[in-house]
Image: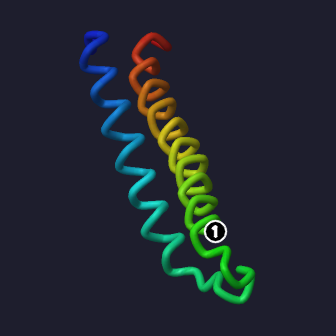
């Protein structure tokens, strides 16, 4: 199995990767009609937070699914 350090670095890379991918996807959405004039900076910060939330959730699912697949060896 993996050591604690290997699991930590894998988790960190996974989270950052999925947050980046989520950020790229969010950038394709046209939210300009929803933003009030003069509130562009706040809207970008909100989008960063949304990317972190979604990316972390997807990463957590991916890492748990990976762990579950490794735990299947204990089934038999």
Q: Is residue 12 above or below residue 59?
A: above
Label 1 residue SS: helix
Of the pair 42 and 73, the residue shown nearer to us: 42
Instruction: Tell me residue 70's x, y (percent).
Output: 39, 22
Examine the rendered structure and indicate whether residue 5 appears above or below residue 58: above
- The quarter of the displayed image where residue 16 is located: top left
Residue 10 coordinates in the image, percent (x, y): 30, 30
Please give the residue where the numbered disc 1 appears in the rendered image.
Answer: 43
Q: In the picture provided, is 45 more to the left or to the right than 3?
A: right
Give left or right: position of 28 versus 15: right
How far from the left and from the top, in percent, is residue 52? 53, 48
8 over 31 or under it: above or below = above
Rate crowding at label 1 as few (under 14), some (14 to 19) or many (20 or more) other CA atoms within 10 Å.
some
Question: Residue at (52%, 36%) from the top-left corner?
Answer: 60
Residue 21 % position (x, y): 41, 61
Quadrant in the rendering for residue 45: bottom right
Q: Nearer the viewer, residue 46 or 30?
A: 46
Q: Residue visible at 54% across and 57% down? A: 48
């Amino acid at each position: 199995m993996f050591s604690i350090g290997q699991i930590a670095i894998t988790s960190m890379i996974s989270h950052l990767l999925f947050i980046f991918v989520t950020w790229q996807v969010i950038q394709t959405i046209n939210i300009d009609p929803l933003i009030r004039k003069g509130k562009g900076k706040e809207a970008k910060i909100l989008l960063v937070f949304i990317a972190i939330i979604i990316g972390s959730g997807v990463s957590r699912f991916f890492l748990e699914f990976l762990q579950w697949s490794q735990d299947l060896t204990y089934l038999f």
